[in-house]
Image (cartoon, coloured by chain):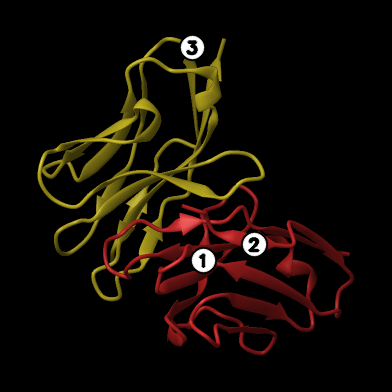
Chain colours: A red, B yellow
């Protein structure tokens, strides 16, 4: 079974620029998550999708972050404009259900803001 | 409030010795508990979960975890540590209200040859 694919692996941009991350979940997984992980900390949930609908985006800074999963498969997370504090690893995860099945993570995108 | 605590920032173990990484939780209902491992520059990998049933749960790479309801703990264990087990370990519990994971702060496990 192919795992969760994310791209790019690394991205360096200047503050106020925009950036987009892509995620392709495990085939058949209806639930998709985007997390932000600051170095050495646990992941912080940004947004959760069930198929192509948003389940929870309460911790997504909506003035600068947006995410979509239009066809209920792959997903894109965008930051515009980026701030220095957005430097982090952005992890995508998927699971077969949103209740008690394990989440499977991609290797993430490490974002550095200059 | 529901929470997860990993009381040790770092655990050091000699190769070949048993290891324990501690986790305690606080939830209002039945706990659904998970352990994940993160190697440098990688995403989190699922190790094992407790939903119901036997208190001793076996997982990947020879790891196991013991659920203790009276002590509200879910400690991760391995009988004989390998240098390759060195990584960051996260405990997590599912929040009752929305089924999202509440994550511990992580414990860095260092296995010395």
Local secondary structure at mark 3: loop
Q: Which residue is mark 3?
A: B15
User: Position of B68 compared to B92: left or right?
Assistant: left
Residue A36 versus residue B1: which sits nearer the camera? A36
Q: Check the residue under mark 1 and report the chain it is in.
A: A
Local secondary structure at mark 2: strand
The x and y percentages for residue A75 are 58, 77
Q: Residue at x 47, y 86 (%)?
A: A52
Q: Residue at x 44, y 35 (%)?
A: B8
Mark found first going from the N terminus, 2 or 1: 2
User: Position of B86 compared to B41: left or right?
Assistant: left
The x and y percentages for residue A30 are 40, 74
Checking the image for residue A25, the label placed there is 1
Q: CA distance from mark 2 to mark 1?
A: 9 Å
Callout in the foreground (3, 1): 1
Q: Which residue is mark 2?
A: A6
* Disc 1 residue crowd, few under 14, some 14–19, many 20+, Cα 10 Å: many
Local secondary structure at mark 1: loop
The quadrant in which residue B40 appears is top right
* Disc 2 residue crowd, few under 14, some 14–19, many 20+, Cα 10 Å: many
Q: Check the residue under mark 3 and report the chain it is in.
A: B
Residue B13 versus residue A103: which sits nearer the camera? A103
Residue B98 versus residue A107: which sits nearer the camera? A107
Q: Residue at x 86, y 74 (%)?
A: A15
Callout in the foreground (2, 3): 2
* Disc 3 residue crowd, few under 14, some 14–19, many 20+, Cα 10 Å: some
For the residues tagged 2 and 1, is the chain the same?
A: yes
User: Position of A76 compared to B51: left or right?
Assistant: right
The x and y percentages for residue B86 are 54, 27
Q: Check the residue under mark 2 and report the chain it is in.
A: A
For the residues tagged 2 and 3, is the chain the same?
A: no
């Amino acid at each position: 079974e192919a795992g969760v694919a994310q791209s790019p692996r690394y991205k360096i941009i200047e503050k106020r620029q925009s950036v987009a991350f892509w995620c392709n979940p495990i085939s058949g997984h209806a639930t998709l998550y985007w997390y932000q992980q600051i170095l050495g900390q646990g992941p912080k949930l940004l947004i959760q999708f069930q198929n192509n609908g948003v389940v929870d985006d309460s911790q997504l800074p909506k003035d600068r972050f947006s995410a979509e999963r239009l066809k209920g498969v792959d997903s894109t997370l965008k930051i515009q404009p980026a701030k220095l504090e957005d430097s982090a690893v952005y992890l995508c995860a998927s699971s077969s259900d949103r209740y008690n099945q394990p989440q499977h993570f991609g290797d993430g995108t490490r974002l550095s803001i200059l | 409030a529901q929470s997860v605590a990993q009381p040790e920032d770092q655990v050091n173990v000699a190769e070949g010795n048993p290891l324990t990484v501690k986790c305690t939780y606080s939830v209002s209902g039945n706990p659904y508990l998970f352990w994940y491992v993160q190697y440098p520059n990688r995403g989190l990998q699922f190790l094992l979960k407790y939903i119901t049933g036997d208190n001793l749960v076996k997982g990947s790479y020879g790891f196991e975890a013991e659920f203790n309801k009276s002590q509200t703990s879910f400690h991760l264990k391995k009988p004989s540590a390998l240098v390759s087990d060195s990584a960051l370990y996260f405990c997590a519990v599912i929040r009752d209200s929305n089924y999202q994971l509440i994550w511990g702060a992580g414990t860095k496990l260092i296995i010395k040859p």
